[in-house]
Image (spheres, rainbow, N blue to C red):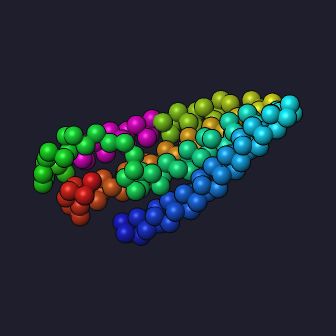
Amino acid sequence: MEKKINKCLDKISSVFAYIAGILLGIMTFIVFLELCVRGLGKPITATTEITSFLFPWVVGFSALPVTREGMQMALSIVTDRIKGKAKQIVVIISNSIVIWFAVTMLVGGIKLSVILRADRLPISGFSKASVYSAIVLAFVGILADYIMKTIGLITSRNTGEAI
């Protein structure tokens, strides 16, 4: 069951990485276009709104691939000096802190989205909840990833040496 969940997370992570890349490309093109037309004295007024909508989603879709591949910042000064079971215990504690933080941020993202559901972006009229839902997406992915990593460590399938 654990292998199936991890395989599913890997596939979702891959899809999320492509979506994040596409959104980043769109956002980059829009900003480049804005810079070009601003030089002609015809700025695009919607650029700020579009980028403020896309940026959280780029981050939201990137969160799972980043944590899944271990590319996030980590304080490995302590864990690099520890070996074997002690390292495994330290990594489990560290992962538990990340899980706690992810749950806290997930709950906060849901609350923020609910509070802002009636607020609208001025040009598009999209609900601000559609922007802040990216927080929910990001921390659901991080939470799932770290829960699976921690389960793997607890069941001793991973000694923590590769982390």
- Residue 90 lies, with reference to residue 45, above or below; the image says below
Q: Residue at x 47, y 55 (%)?
A: 65
**Res. 96 image quadrant:** top left
Q: Is residue 127 visible?
A: no
* Residue 33 versus residue 153 in the image, above or below: above
Secondary structure mostly taken by the magenta-highlighted segment of the chain: helix
Residue sitting nearer the eye, 107 or 39? 39
Taking depth in this image into account, of 29 and 136 the one nearest to the observer is 29
Which of these two is toward me, 53 or 106? 53
Residue 67 appears at what percent x and percent y? Answer: 41, 51
At 59% from the left and 47% from the top, the residue drawn is: 58
Tell me where residue 155 sits by quadrant.
bottom left
Looking at the image, the residue that sits furthest to the front is 39
Please state if 84 lies on the left or on the right of 135 as rendered: left
> Where is residue 95 shown, x and y percent of the image?
31, 45
Dividing the picture into quadrants, the one containing residue 159 is bottom left
Q: Is residue 25 above or below residue 41?
A: below
Q: Which image quarter holds the N terminus?
A: bottom left
Image check: 103 left or right of 108?
A: left
| Percent coordinates x, y for residue 70 in the rendering | 37, 52
Residue sitting at 40 percent across and 56 percent down?
Answer: 69
Q: Is residue 23 magenta?
A: no
Q: Which residues are magenta?
A: 89-104
For residue 91, say whether it is visible. yes
Image side of residue 64 versus residue 1, left or right: right
The x, y position of residue 133, in whole percent, is: 62, 42
Task: Give the residue at x 19% y 40%.
Answer: 78
Q: In this picture, is 11 found above or below 93?
A: below
